[in-house]
């Protein structure tokens, strides 16, 4: 099923009225398989994160500040595949990727494969603001995070039973070896786990936010645990500037979600901005062109959210659903999950 939101997802805000769009991952998210408690929990989380960003922007904070505030909340929330609640690698680790980009000056920061920094989005921001680099990986990135005072945790902090059981189920199905239960994880439950969703539901849940602040600056941020069962140090699109995350005041800010390999090959985020910048496309048209034509032509799956400095907001996805929310200054919060919602 595909969803075209041309027109519907596009609102025109007065210049320099703040606006936010947020996603919590795209994939096979369908009404028929979503329990009402789970749906309510997702809607509540998306609301909380959007409101946190709104508060920052209302007080005159920057789009970068608003993005970090919202993503920190989603990273702490075990519902999403970012921070605590991230999916596991085939070796039974949580390896986290994140990126942030400031459209005002094209500064960017990204991290991949981090295992100890509680908020990977804050680490990406620190790379952008406190290092001479754009991207750091693995243990070195965590060491840098500790050196600039970011909270460090034991890797078992990111463990959740639901994601662990989901990994075990996938590896069993694929006939791959099951790694030992991670050190420091709580003892395995004796009965079925009391979770709001079955372990294999919604392996998605990458989170991303794009925002426009009152100064007229846009920014984008993305945080993820990547794809479940990934191996060999695999890194997806989320921390790759231009692929899963991009922002420029000359065009737009984008955060993507989906099977990262396709998004890297198409440089999806930059591609949307290039269509806006050089072809003069409206944002929604550019987003739909990349998702429904270019990504679909490669048989890739996923979606994106986007914003322009003149207040156009867009989302587009070719999966059955995408967790998403948007809010403009003085407007009403709009949340969507399934493909048939506006
Ligand atoms: N794009 C992410 C990755 O490939 C995963 C996702 O968005 O679901 O790492």
Image: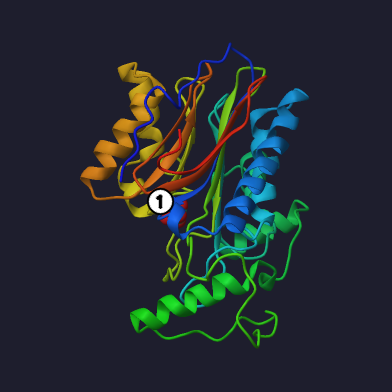
- Is the residue 166 above or below the residue 72 in the image? below
> Does mark 1 have its CB less than 8 Å from ligand 1?
yes
For mark 1, does the 10 Å Cα neighbourhood hold few (<14), some (14 to 19), or many (20 or more) residues?
many
Q: Residue furthest left?
A: 297
| Residue beneath the point at 52% across and 52% down | 206
- Is the residue 160 above or below the residue 82 in the image? below
| Residue beneath the point at 49% across and 50% down | 25
- Is 313 left or right of 276, judged from the image as shown? right
In which quadrant will I find the C terminus? top left
- Is the residue 177 above or below the residue 317 in the image? below
Q: Quadrant of residue 331?
A: top right
Q: Which residue is mark 1?
A: 258
Give the percent coordinates (x, y) of residue 301. Answer: 33, 50
| Residue beneath the point at 43% across and 53% down | 30
| Residue beneath the point at 53% across and 77% down | 165
- Is 233 left or right of 57, judged from the image as shown? left
Q: Nearer the viewer, residue 187 or 37?
A: 37
Q: Is residue 122 visible?
A: no
Q: Nearer the viewer, residue 163 or 263?
A: 163
Q: Is residue 226 visible?
A: yes
- Is 229 left or right of 67, judged from the image as shown? left
Give the percent coordinates (x, y) of residue 156. Answer: 67, 73
Give the percent coordinates (x, y) of residue 319. Answer: 36, 48
Give the percent coordinates (x, y) of residue 74. Answer: 64, 50
- Is 277 left or right of 81, judged from the image as shown? left
Q: Quadrant of ligand 1?
A: bottom left
Q: Nearer the viewer, residue 310 or 80?
A: 80
């Amino acid at each position: 099923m595909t969803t075209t939101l041309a027109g519907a997802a596009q609102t025109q805000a007065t210049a320099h009225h703040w606006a936010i769009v947020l996603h919590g991952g795209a994939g096979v998210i369908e009404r028929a398989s979503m329990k009402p408690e789970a749906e309510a929990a997702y809607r509540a989380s998306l609301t909380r994160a959007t409101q946190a960003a709104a508060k920052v922007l209302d007080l005159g904070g920057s789009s970068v500040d608003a993005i970090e505030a919202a993503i920190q909340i989603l990273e702490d929330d075990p519902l999403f595949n970012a921070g605590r609640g991230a999916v596991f690698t085939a070796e039974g680790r949580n390896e986290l990727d994140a990126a942030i980009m400031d459209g005002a000056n094209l500064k960017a920061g990204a991290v991949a494969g981090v295992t100890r920094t509680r908020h990977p989005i804050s680490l990406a921001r620190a790379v952008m603001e406190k290092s001479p680099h754009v991207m750091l990986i693995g243990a070195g990135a965590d060491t840098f995070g500790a050196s600039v005072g970011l909270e460090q945790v034991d890797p078992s902090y990111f463990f959740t039973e639901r994601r662990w059981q989901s990994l075990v189920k996938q590896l069993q199905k694929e006939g791959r070896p099951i790694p030992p239960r991670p050190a420091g994880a709580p003892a395995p439950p004796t009965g079925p786990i009391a979770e709001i969703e079955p372990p294999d539901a919604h392996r998605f849940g990458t989170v991303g936010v794009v925002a426009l602040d009152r100064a007229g600056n846009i920014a984008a941020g993305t945080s993820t645990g990547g794809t479940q069962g990934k191996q060999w140090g695999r890194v997806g699109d989320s921390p790759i500037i231009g692929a899963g995350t991009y922002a420029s005041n000359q065009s737009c800010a984008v955060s993507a979600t989906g099977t990262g390999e396709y998004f890297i090959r198409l440089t999806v985020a930059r591609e949307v901005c290039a269509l806006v910048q050089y072809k003069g496309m409206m944002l929604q048209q550019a987003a739909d062109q990349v998702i429904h034509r270019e990504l679909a032509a490669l048989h890739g799956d996923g979606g994106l959210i986007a914003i322009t400095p003149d207040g156009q907001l867009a989302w587009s996805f070719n999966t059955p659903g995408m967790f998403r929310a948007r809010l403009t200054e003085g407007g009403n919060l709009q949340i969507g999950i399934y493909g048939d919602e506006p």
